[in-house]
Image (cartoon, helix red, strand yellow):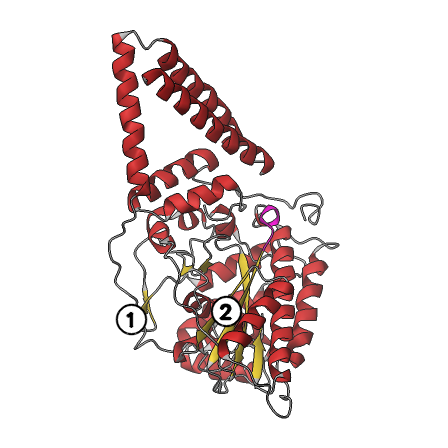
Amino acid sequence: MLTLINLAVLALSTLFFIILLAASLVEREWRASTIAFFSMLGNAGLWTVFYIYTEIKFINIINILALGFLVLIAVISLVKYFPRREARDTSHIIQYDERDNMFSRNNLKNNPEQARQYYENHPEKEEGDRKLQEKPNIGEPGHTFYDPLYSPVFDAAFTYLNRTRQVSEGEKAPGTVETTPGEVTGVIKQLARYYGAADVGVTRIKPYHIYSHAGRHSENWGLPVKLDHTYAVVIMVAMDIDMIKTAPSLPVIMESARHYVESAKIAHIIAEYIRGLGYRARSHTDGNYQVLCAPLAVDAGLGELGRMGLLMHPVHGPCVRLSVVTTELELAIEKPGTAHHIEEFCEICKKCAHNCPSKSIPQEEEPQSRGCRHWSIDQEKCFAFWKNIGTDCAFCIAVCPYTKPDTLIHKLVRFYISRNPINQRIALFFDDLLYGRKKKLPTANPPQPLSRH
């Protein structure tokens, strides 16, 4: 009987290591491939010894202990238990003012009167902001990863994206098409996926989802945001992991720009579709938001808020870009699905914080901000690093254990992580072992920045 059990364990464990090795080779993760290969050999040798020498008492005892340990780990792995977390109290959260955003503050160098008004109210920010404003804008010469041929690629995408702002709003069609919330929500979700969304969710809009004042563009700077829509459709697109792995070099901002464009395209089409049904709708895209995407995405059930302050999707992790459509059209909201407990993993992982080149990501507990406990970063430090290197960095996204392809091995790991805290610590140990705890920052762009796509 013991011989048959050993044979079964040998076969199953070898199959596991073969799957791990194959996935690592496909991903070009050479450290993981090497460890998987030698682990497979060592594991095969161990269980072969147990299989052959079952009559030797000493080996037999070790064999039984090893099997017992495997059974214990298997049982623990399947237990679904997490201590109850204190829910975030958003009842007193203060709306975020878009004028405080670093992109808005960087634009103040072009608007002296608006700069004067802002720094009269925020004198503590003026000195640091002025130093950042003197540095070249992202995409201009003078950065670590600037390339005269390739940097204009992402700049062209953002310029195009800015020109699409005019289609974010429009007149609704006269009359309304009769439909039910469930039916039209289903069509909208199908439409989003048809045009390339990796996921899409719906939620009711709450005050803290909306900016208090506009700040990104000079024409409406400082005006209160008046958005009376009741529902939001949150659109998520997934970025190419191979491009993001080059972080913080040039391919990351090319990929980021590409998917801001893709998410905008979907949002504009859905907003136009809803207006065609006779209801008001507005698309919110990069550089043209009236709402905060990450809180909306969390409340729409697309994932959880990660340590880096970004949405953590259960499949694609933080390697995503978002856009939103808000509308007066009544939509159907699905009941929350199974919890993935990503926030609990973020609490113990800290890999993004340990690797952040600008030390912008907190390593401690969730900070309090605007009257609510939630993950947020030091945006001044983060943006300063962006303006030094000339990209939007994304190193935190690249090192995140959730930034992995949706292959069989990673599906298993994500399921394993969702079960209990012990599994999470074991998974983190092996992620550090296979992929490394600290990643090395590249100092130059790859030879062909677009070749990985």
Q: Residue at x 29, y 71 (%)?
A: 89
Q: Position of residue 202 (x, y in %)?
A: 48, 71
Q: Quadrant of the N terminus?
A: top left
Q: What amino acid type should be assigned to the residue bearing mark 1?
A: Asp
The reply to whether the magenta stretch includes residue 241 is yes
Dot 2 falls on a residue whose secondary structure is helix
Q: Nearer the viewer, residue 258 or 151?
A: 258
The reply to whether the magenta stretch includes residue 263 is no
Mark toward the viewer: 2 or 1:
1
Marking on residue 429? none
* Residue 204 visible in the snapshot: yes
Q: Position of residue 136 (x, y in %)?
A: 62, 63
**Numbered circles on residues, count:** 2
* Residue 439 visible in the snapshot: no
Q: Nearer the viewer, residue 98 or 188?
A: 188
Q: Nearer the viewer, residue 254 or 14?
A: 14
Dot 1 falls on a residue whose secondary structure is loop
**Residues shaded magenta:** 239-243
Q: Position of residue 208 (x, y in %)?
A: 39, 77
Q: What amino acid type should be assigned to the residue bearing mark 2?
A: Met
Instruction: For marks 2 and 1, give the CA distance.
Output: 26 Å
The secondary structure that dominates the magenta segment is helix
Position of 300 relative to 272 (above/below): above
User: In the figure, is residue 398 to the left or right of 3?
Assistant: right
Q: Which residue is mark 1?
A: 89
Q: Label 2 crowding class (10 Å Cα cut-off): few <14, some 14-19, many 20+?
A: some
Residue 11: name its quadrant: top left
Q: Position of residue 290 (x, y in %)?
A: 51, 78
**Of all residues shown, which one is farthest toward the top?**
56
Q: Which residue is mark 2?
A: 102
